[in-house]
């Protein structure tokens, strides 16, 4: 694979996170030609200019922008709920409406970081390829008890010929015509509509922050505690040893782009933000909670006796 198309959908408040992700794609894939496709909502002229500056500093990259208004009416037509007070995250469901004449497409959430080559994705030839999510089995069986697996929609690797051959977009539309009022709208819709078309990627293509935060045995206890069915111990050890795409979901309120964070991906954001001339964000949580003690409390939740957990919690939140 010599060329890859990468899609982001975002509004202004996620711009810096997306730029860190975009920058990480480029510094980890200097041997690939990369076309970025950005569906933007509420971008200012300065926002567009900033993206152009980052992309143009690499010889192997270019960028195409798409107006979110091309898709917004469809989101409202199917009454798809907002996610975190924004509708633009649902735009990934409708990329067929604006992105044409590409042979592959990698959708990335704005809070992902690419830390190794993406060339290996070419070996995964399913219509849509995804990593299994850490959602409780109880949740996704509640969507439809015939589901056999549940996937995270933060990373989508799409082979466009097979996507069209299998009618995946039509399947999404038919599912949305029935119901869209889900807790995790785009993710639930994709899992329900494309259950027979999703090919499983190794966990290192969407390594959630919880996967890296806990020790491997703690992680398995975490899975058991939350009734999570994902990957084997060996598969998770391999993913943690050889990560490719990191997904910076929150660790109990901390994000990777915050100062003094306990987040496992904080070191990457510090590096990329410095290269981009950004400052890490402050969090009020740091002013009221001892970081090391809180770190211990989180880990203790899944392995310590209740009495110890209660005492630590009193120290933290009295």
Image: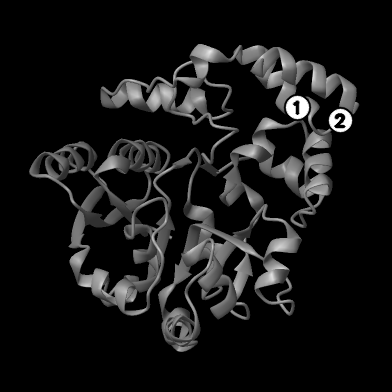
Report which residue position mark 1 lands on. 299
Between residue 220 and residue 54, name the one nearer to us: 220
Q: Quadrant of the N terminus?
A: bottom left
How packed mark 1 is, by other alpha carbons closer than 10 Å (few <14, some 14-19, many 20 or more), is: some
Tell me if 155 is positioned left or right of 47 in this view: right
- Residue at 54% x, 62% y: name it: 183
The secondary structure type at the circle numbered 1 is helix
Quarter of the image for residue 141 reads bottom right
Report which residue position mark 2 lands on. 303
Quote the CA–CA distance across marks 2 and 1: 7 Å
The secondary structure type at the circle numbered 2 is loop
In the drawing, what numbered circle is on residue 150? none
Kindly check if marks 2 and 1 are in contact, taking CB atoms under 8 A apart as contact. Answer: yes
Q: Quadrant of the C terminus?
A: top right
Quarter of the image for residue 298 reads top right
Query: Residue 15: x, y in percent?
Result: 28, 41
Tell me if 24 is positioned left or right of 47 in this view: right
- Residue at 52% x, 71% y: name it: 190
Quarter of the image for residue 21 reads top left
The furthest residue to the front = 318
């Amino acid at each position: 694979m010599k060329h890859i198309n990468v899609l982001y959908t975002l509004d202004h408040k996620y711009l810096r996170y997306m730029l860190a992700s975009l920058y990480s794609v480029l510094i980890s894939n200097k041997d690939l030609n990369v076309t970025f496709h950005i569906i933007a909502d509420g971008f200012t002229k300065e926002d567009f200019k900033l993206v152009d500056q980052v992309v143009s500093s690499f010889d192997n990259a270019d960028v195409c922008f798409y107006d979110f208004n091309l898709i917004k009416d469809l989101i409202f037509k199917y009454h798809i709920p907002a996610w975190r007070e924004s509708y633009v995250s649902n735009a990934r469901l409708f990329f067929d409406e604006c992105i044409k004449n590409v042979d592959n497409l990698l959708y990335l959430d704005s809070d992902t970081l690419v830390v190794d080559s993406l060339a290996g994705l070419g070996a995964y030839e399913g219509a849509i390829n995804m990593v299994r999510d850490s959602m409780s089995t109880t949740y996704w069986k509640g969507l439809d008890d015939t589901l056999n697996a549940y996937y995270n929609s933060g990373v989508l690797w799409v082979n466009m010929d097979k996507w069209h051959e299998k009618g995946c977009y039509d399947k999404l539309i038919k599912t949305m015509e029935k119901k869209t009022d889900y807790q995790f709208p785009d993710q639930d819709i994709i899992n329900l509509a494309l259950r027979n078309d999703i090919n499983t990627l190794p966990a290192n293509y969407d390594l959630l922050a919880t996967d890296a935060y806990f020790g491997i045995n703690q992680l398995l206890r975490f899975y058991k505690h939350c009734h999570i069915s994902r990957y084997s111990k060996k598969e998770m050890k391999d993913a943690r040893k050889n990560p490719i795409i990191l997904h910076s979901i929150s660790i109990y309120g901390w994000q990777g782009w915050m100062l003094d964070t306990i987040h496992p991906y904080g070191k990457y954001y510090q590096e990329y933000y410095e290269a981009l001339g950004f400052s890490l964000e402050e969090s009020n949580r740091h002013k009221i909670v001892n970081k090391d003690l809180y770190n211990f409390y989180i880990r203790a939740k899944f392995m310590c006796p209740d009495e110890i957990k209660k005492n630590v919690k009193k120290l933290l939140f009295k």
